[in-house]
Amino acid sequence: MVKRFRGNKLERWEVSIVKAMVEADKYNDQDIQSYFTRPSRTINHARIKEIRDGAKHKAVATASVEELKQFLSSWPNLDPETGLNAEGDELLIKAREAMTAAVHTFNGAGLTFRSEIFIVTAIIAWTYLLHAWFKRKGIEYRYVKDGEVQKTKEGADKYLELGACLRHEKSPISEGAKRNLEFLLGIRHEIEHRSTSRIDDFLSAKLQAACLNFDQPHLSGPV
């Protein structure tokens, strides 16, 4: 059974859809609530009333009729095994897929570069996992300077890399797991900038620890 978490709230895109459903004038608050409550998250119908009455989220634009149709046609868009939503839980889904890919690659026959591939992919998995956790807790996980979100040279928001996530004062990672990941980050830098020799036998315990720590319930379940 998927664990429910306190502090659940609608995301901005969901508020936009709720407003469109209110404007459609054929859904009551309980009807609308049913579209946004899922096994991993409960939304109180009072949150819908706040939007209907204009008490909250005034700045959020109403979704278009086409966007509402698309939402309704794809609903509920849930993974049957985990209850995760393909859009709302995208970060967590990516994290799990990346770690699964890392393990499958390491266990693949005939590979001689498997530790290096595992490390790079596992670091991606951990980064998305922590981003998902920060997002669920309402913690900013982008680089912000003087109140402005920093941008990449392409103009996209600049998100914290894994090292910065681990150093964040609100990081949920234990000291042991943090040390393990910092060690793997060091190896990742070697992989990027230098040639590595056959390291599988030397790193197997570290790699296994990265997997086991990732699978801890407070992080790998719906965050």
Image: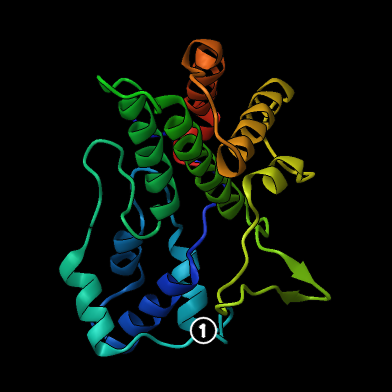
SS of the residue at dot 1? loop
What residue is shown with label 1?
60
In the image, taking residue 64 as reference, residue 62 lies left or right, namely right
> Relative to the observer, which residue lies in front, 205 or 94?
205
Q: Residue at x 57, y 17 (%)?
A: 206
Q: Residue at x 50, y 83 (%)?
A: 53
Q: How many marks?
A: 1
Using residue 95 as the reference point, say whether residue 59 is left or right of it.
right
Residue drawn at 31 percent across, 24 percent down? 111
Q: Is residue 133 above or below residue 198?
A: below
**Camera-side residue of 95 and 112:** 112
Q: Position of residue 43 (x, y in %)?
A: 44, 56
Q: Which quadrant does the N terminus fall into?
A: top left
Q: Residues within 10 Å of mark 1 (few under 14, many from 20)?
A: some
Q: Can residue 116 be seen at all in this image of the molecule?
A: yes
- Please state which of residues 187 and 73 is positioned toward the viewer in this rendering: 187
Q: With respect to residue 84, does 210 lie above or below?
A: above
Q: Position of residue 151 (x, y in %)?
A: 64, 75
Compared to 106, does 164 lie above or below? Answer: below
Q: Residue drawn 65% across and 55% down?
A: 160
Amino acid type at image mark 1: Val
Color encoding of the figure: rainbow
**Image location of residue 123, percent across then percent down:** 53, 39
Residue 126 percent across, percent down from the top left = 53, 39
